Each structure stands twice: as C-alpha cells, then as structure tokens.
Image (cartoon, rainbow, N blue to C red):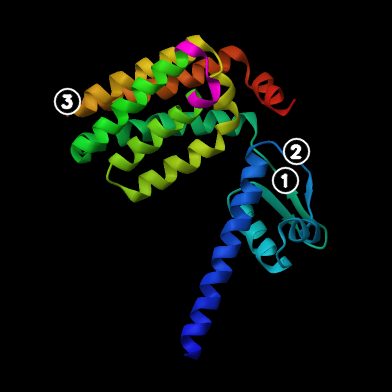
Amino acid sequence: MDNFANGKEEMDRYSLRGKVFNRIREDILAGNYKERDELKEAVISKEMGVSRTPVREALRQLELEGLVSIIPNKGAYVNGITAKDIYDIYTIRSYLEGLCAKWACEHITREQIEDLEEIIYLSEFHIQREHWEQIFELDNRFHFYLYRACGSKVLEHILSDYHHYVERVRKNTLSSQERARTASAEHKAILEAVANKDEEKAERLANEHIFQSMENIRHQGLEWLMERHEE
C-alpha cells in the first residue's frame, strides 16, 4: 500500500510539473514574457496556486529546451525565440515535414484521409469568409493529423514541438487571404499525393510547403510579424 501511495505521489508530482511547464512555455512562445524577463519562482507559484518545487523543476526543463537561462544565485531569465531560431526551425521543418508526408504514404488510413479532406473543405469555407481564428485552427489541425498519420511517435512529437515554437509567427502569416488560400491549396496537393501513395511527390510537396511559408515570412519581415503579435 505504501509503495502504491508513493508511486501515485510521484506521478502527481510529474503531472503537476508538466502542467506548470506547459503553462510557462506557452506564455513564452505567445510573447507574454519578453526576452530577458525574470521568471520568479515565488510569483509563478502564487499565480498558479502550486508550491515552488514544480515551478523550479519546470524552469530547469525549460532551460534544457533553450527557452530559459538559469543564472546561479540570481534567477531564471527568458531567452525566448530569436529571428534566427525561427528561420532554423522552418529549415529543419521543411525536411522533417517532407519525411512525415513520405512515411504517411505507407501508414495513413482511409479514415485519416477523410478527416484531412474535411479539414481542407472547412478551410476553404472559412477562407472565403475571412474567419481567421478558424483558419488558423484548421491549419494546425491539418498538420497535427498528418503528423499522427506518419506512423512515428518520435517524428510526431518533434514536429508538434516545432509547430508550437513558431505559432506566434504562423498566426500572423495566415491572416492574409492570399497566403491562407495558397496554403490550403498546398495542403490539398500534399494530401492527394499521400492518398495516391506517391512518396516522392508527397515528400517534395510537403518540403516546398514549409519553404514557401518561410519565404512568405521573409517577404513580410519576421521582426514586424513578431512585433505585430505583441501589440
């Protein structure tokens, strides 16, 4: 009984740390914290209604991800995501999304194809009406469903994390009807290649899709996009 109680206590601790970690990470990626802001354990623990232990553990985990720097005897400070980080992530994503689409050709189910077809249909509907929140959510859903269809939990996890890291910028790039329409057409072409089991074409189209997204960011100006989100 004691072993069970200790095990449950340990699971609860990790679960609580995970919640704190996700909350702080989302706040950093959303721009709610600025670069070099101090993350005070006492303040965060009070705001979230938890002890300082899960906050301290979450900050250490965020340091491993490069989002936070912990300076001994001083505190934890936000590193945030730099312009170079964004471009690096998009470059890496272009290769990994291609691999994801290629593997999906082998593993995707009929039900998953139908789900992705419905997402594209709904995207086209909302693009015509300029419903930006729905467009952004459906864009997220398309990528996450495709990640799931690749048949690799490891690749799904990596791509999901990268997707979250650039969420701030992605949301602004999709607030243009022209880019939203183009992105939806690119999604449709990727899905057709995957459904037809054309691995080479699916990989190339997925790679080009992310590359075009990065070119769109360059055209609009990354600094402007990030500042716009923070207004």
Q: Nearest the camera: 183 or 133? A: 133
For marks 1 and 3, give the one nearer the viewer: 3
Magenta-colored span:
128-134
- Residue 94 is one of the magenta-drawn residues: no
Q: Does residue 20 lie above or below 120 as drawn?
A: below
User: Mark 1 and mark 2: span between their CA atoms?
Assistant: 7 Å
Percent coordinates x, y for residue 131 in the rendering: 52, 19
Q: Which mark is residue 196?
A: 3
Q: Which mark is residue 170?
A: none
Kind of residue sitting beneath label 1 = Val
Instruction: Check contact, mark 1 vs mark 2: CB within 8 A.
Output: yes
Find the residue positioned furthest to the right: 74
Q: Residue at coordinates 36% horizontally, 18% vertically from top-left? A: 186
Task: Tell me the SS state at disc 2.
Answer: loop
Kind of residue sitting beneath label 3 = Asn
Q: Nearest the camera: 91 or 144? A: 144
**Which badge, 1 or 3, comes first in the chain's sequence?**
1
Which residue has dot 1 on it? Answer: 78
Percent coordinates x, y for residue 39 in the rendering: 76, 52
Instruction: Check contact, mark 2 vs mark 3: CB within 8 A.
Output: no
**Which badge, 2 or 3, comes first in the chain's sequence?**
2
Tell me the quadrant of the picture where the C terminus can be found. top right
Percent coordinates x, y for residue 30 in the rendering: 65, 37
User: Mark 1 and mark 3: span between their CA atoms?
Assistant: 45 Å
Q: Which mark is residue 34?
A: 2
